[in-house]
Image: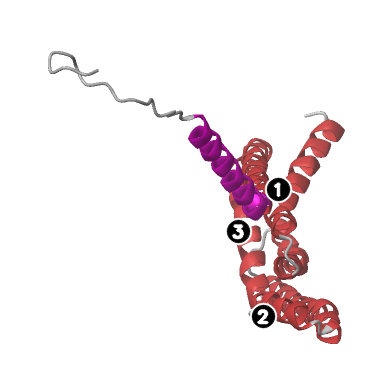
Amino acid sequence: AWTPSQPWQPSYKPAVTSQPFLAADRTGARGRLGRWWARDAGLLRTSAWSLGVRLTGMLASFAVGVQLARFLGPEGFGTYGVVVAVALIVGVAAQAGLPAIATREIAVALDRKDWGRLRMVLHHLPRRVLGAALLLAAALGIGAVLWSAGGGALDPELWWAPVLIPLFALTALVGAQLRGLDRPVASQGLETLLRPALMCLLCLGWLLWSGT
């Protein structure tokens, strides 16, 4: 019997435990993590590959810059910059905005399953860009010949600019087509990694062949 001098004690002890709640919380967190990973795993992998490609391309570009500055000297390196700038500017004119159109049209064709339209974009646009690039390169070459015939000074290395115009224009277009085909890593590799990597290998090959 309970008396006022004794503290009150309940006649039962509720079974309070946090284990079921902790287990449910862990299960819920694990489920949320699994759903998040299933939803965003592809995006995370693509982002990681894209970051790796861009960092590798930056390192390759830095290595090319160091090699060219060492081999060509200040005057030759300046000539190289002029050649690349001219090729890039004329290459942009040869593209005529078609890379952006190619990305959009490929995405629309894939969404609508219009395979004829997709083949047209993949095969017809490169021919148009190549034709425009060749015409502009020929016009630039003819202008250089007329300039030289008129007594103007022209470095022999500048003749590489017309050669590089079709390469730069087609590289930009193919990269845009790869983006439309949902290949962003391959597109970035083509635009930011392949060109400096090839230039780096050419410089190393020249170093080994010449022995200087």
**Distance between the Cα atoms at labels 2 and 1?**
26 Å
Q: Between label 3 and label 2, give the one nearer the viewer.
A: 2
Q: Is residue 32 left or right of residue 115?
A: left
The answer to whether residue 146 shows anywhere in this view is: no
Q: Position of residue 57 (x, y in %)?
A: 66, 46
From this viewpoint, which residue is outermost toward the top? Answer: 5
Q: Position of residue 88 (x, y in %)?
A: 64, 65
Q: Are marks 2 and 1 in contact (CB under 8 Å)?
A: no
Instruction: Please tell me how crowded label 1 is: few (under 14), some (14-19), or many (20+) other residues with Cα within 10 Å.
Output: many
Secondary structure at badge 3 equals: helix
Which quarter of the figure has residue 56?
top right
In the rendered image, the quadrant that contains the C terminus is top right
Label 3 belongs to which residue?
A: 82
Secondary structure at badge 2 equals: helix
Count of numbered labels shown in the rendering: 3
The amino acid type, in three-letter code, at marker 1 is: Pro
Instruction: Please tell me how crowded label 2 is: few (under 14), some (14-19), or many (20+) other residues with Cα within 10 Å.
Output: some
The answer to whether residue 97 shows anywhere in this view is: yes
Instruction: Please tell me how crowded label 3 is: few (under 14), some (14-19), or many (20+) other residues with Cα within 10 Å.
Output: some
Please tell me which residue is depicted at 62% across the width and 51% down the height of the picture.
35
Q: Position of residue 127 (x, y in %)?
A: 83, 79
Q: Which residues are magenta?
A: 19-41
Above or below residue 8? Residue 201 is below
Q: Position of residue 36 (x, y in %)?
A: 59, 50
Label 1 belongs to which residue?
A: 196
- The image's mark for residue 101 is 2
The amino acid type, in three-letter code, at marker 2 is: Ile
Q: Between label 2 and label 1, give the one nearer the viewer.
A: 2
Please tell me which residue is depicted at 64% across the width and 55% down the height of the picture.
39
Which quarter of the figure has residue 12?
top left
In the rendered image, the quadrant that contains the N terminus is top left
